[in-house]
Structure formats: C-alpha cells, structure tokens
Amino acid sequence: MYRRLLCYVEAGETRLEELEGVLDLASQLQSRLIVLAVLPEESPDPSKEEKQERDILEDRTWNFLYEIEDVAFGRELKISLMLEEGKPEETIASVVKSYEVDLCATFLYKGLDAELLLQKLGSTPLLFFNQEGR
Amino acid sequence: MIRISEAIREEGIVLNLKAQEKVAVIKELVSVMVDLGLIQDEKTFLADILKRENLESTGIGLGVAIPHARTTATNELLLAFGRSAKGVDFNSLDGKPSHLIFLIAAPEEKKSHYIMALARLSKMLHKEEMRTRLSKAATPAEVMEILKEAE
C-alpha cells in the first residue's frame, strides 16, 4: 500500500538517532525509503564566505545522507537518496508527485512551514516524528 | 581528508564500457580493479557490490551511478570509473540511464572514509559542469585532471 515513503531531512542535519522511527516504519511497511534533503537556492552573486558556508552545508548533508544509507543497508531496507535545491515545501511536493510517493515523513524543523507543506501535499499523508524518533 | 583523485588511477578509468547492462558493467569495472592488483578477492567483492545493488538504486540520477561497498576484499579506498555513451539502467529514481559510473570499494573498518568518499563524489557529480567535462574527456589522463581540479 505504501510502496514509497519519503523522508525529508533538513540540510545540515546530523542526528541519525532521530531517523530510527522512520527506518522502523519503512521496514514494517516494506516501503522503498527515499531520503530527501533540500539545499537553499544559491544567491546569484555569492560572496566568498557564502560560497564556503554552502560548501560545508553541502558536504555535511551528503555525509548525513550516506550515513543514513549505511544504516538502512544494515537493515536490508530499500533506499534512495536525493539532494535537491529550492524551497523545502515545494521541493517535497514536487518529489512526491514526480516519484509517486505514497507517504511522507519528516520532523518539526524550524525552517519547514508545516501548514504550507500539508497544503502542497494534498491527499498524500504526512507524518511528523519527534526528536525521540516517535 | 579523502581525495577522490588519489583513490583512482588512470588504469582504472574505462572511457568506453563494453558492457551494456548493470551487472555486466559492474563486473567490467571490478575486473579492472582486479587486473590492477587492487582487489584480493574478486568473488567476495563482486558479491558485496551486488548485495547492495539488489537493495538500492545506486543510480543517483542525472546520468550518474555510484555502485559501492565496504568489503573485506581490499585494504584501501579504491575507485574505478566507467563511461557509457549509450547509458546503463541502474534503476535510478529519475528513470534515466547512467552514463557516468563510479565504482567505490572501501575496507570494512574504514566507514568514515567510505562515507566521505561517497559524499564528496556525489557532491562533485551533482554539478552539471563536472558531468559535462567528464562526458567529454578524451583520455583517462584528462579525467584525472578534471577530478584533481574539482578537489
């Protein structure tokens, strides 16, 4: 029923333990887990410092995605990683539509407008996990 | 600091892959590593790579695939690169064939190096300019130069 489960993680996030609940859910539902992170759009003329900051953020995000992949592989979960650029709510909705995602999961990140995301997702169910991964 | 350009050799670069199907492409790149004397146990390495491949799509989209494994078959971080003009189906989420294929092998115990290499390579290949340059490179030496410059 839930063939594809999308989990949005904030760019720069590093707390792997919070993902436990999502990994458990993907395992129980036997879903393919798509882990998505979204980088903010790059300004047209970034300063040297802005470029460096973005570089570090991108490094940290890819590292985190592959940390998740490694844990998921240990649990024999089907997983795909995605790193996109843009506004999180729009990007999540676009990925949900493009890749026929059946269920969405995320966390109450400060940078995520939950109400807007619910609007954009339409009928796709959305689960919020807390910091204990529940 | 992990450097992609230090984990790959010119002899580990195949600009015109003969194989056209995922498993055959992986076998072709694995045999390149074996021929270089970099893999102690070909059978184990191939099994480790294919185990992951059966669970995941290592096609990361944008025409790129990064099959990878931590394995007891090597003592060092290794990369091989293959290019396919026709493209190979790596079950990418975007449904597009992969033209640029990087195979990564890392020792079981070097998890952090392995993750860093994957992250670094993914970041590099996410840039369109990088993919275009690798697609157009005429020689393995040119590929090496492109990787060094990107780092």
Image (cartoon, rainbow, N blue to C red):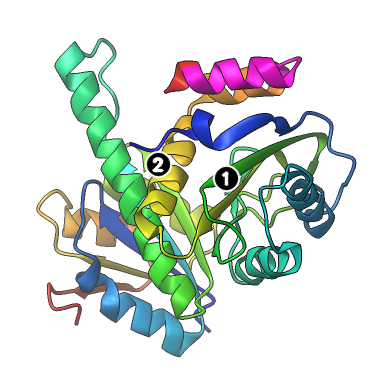
Provide the residue span drawn in magenta.
B136-148
**Residue, disc 2:** A84
Observer-side mark, 2 or 1, equals 1
Q: Tell me which residue sits at (29%, 24%) in the image.
A: A42
Judged left or right of residue A76, residue B33 is right
Toward the bottom, the furthest residue is A28
Picture quadrant of residue A67:
bottom left
Q: Tell me which residue sits at (29%, 13%) in the image.
A: A44
Secondary structure under the numbered disc 2 in the rendered image? strand
Neighbourhood count class around disc 2 (C-alpha, 10 Å): few under 14, some 14–19, many 20 upward: some
- Residue placed most toward the observer, A108 or A69: A69
Q: Look at label 2 and name its amino acid.
A: Glu
Q: Tell me which residue sits at (34%, 49%) in the image.
A: A63
Judged left or right of residue B23, residue B109 is left
Q: Position of residue B11 (x, y in %)?
A: 73, 31
Q: Position of residue A121 (x, y in %)?
A: 35, 60
**Residue, disc 1:** B78
Q: Look at label 1 and name its amino acid.
A: Leu
Against A82, residue A49 (above or below) is above
Labels 2 and 1 touching (C-beta < 8 A): no
Toward the right, the furthest residue is B18
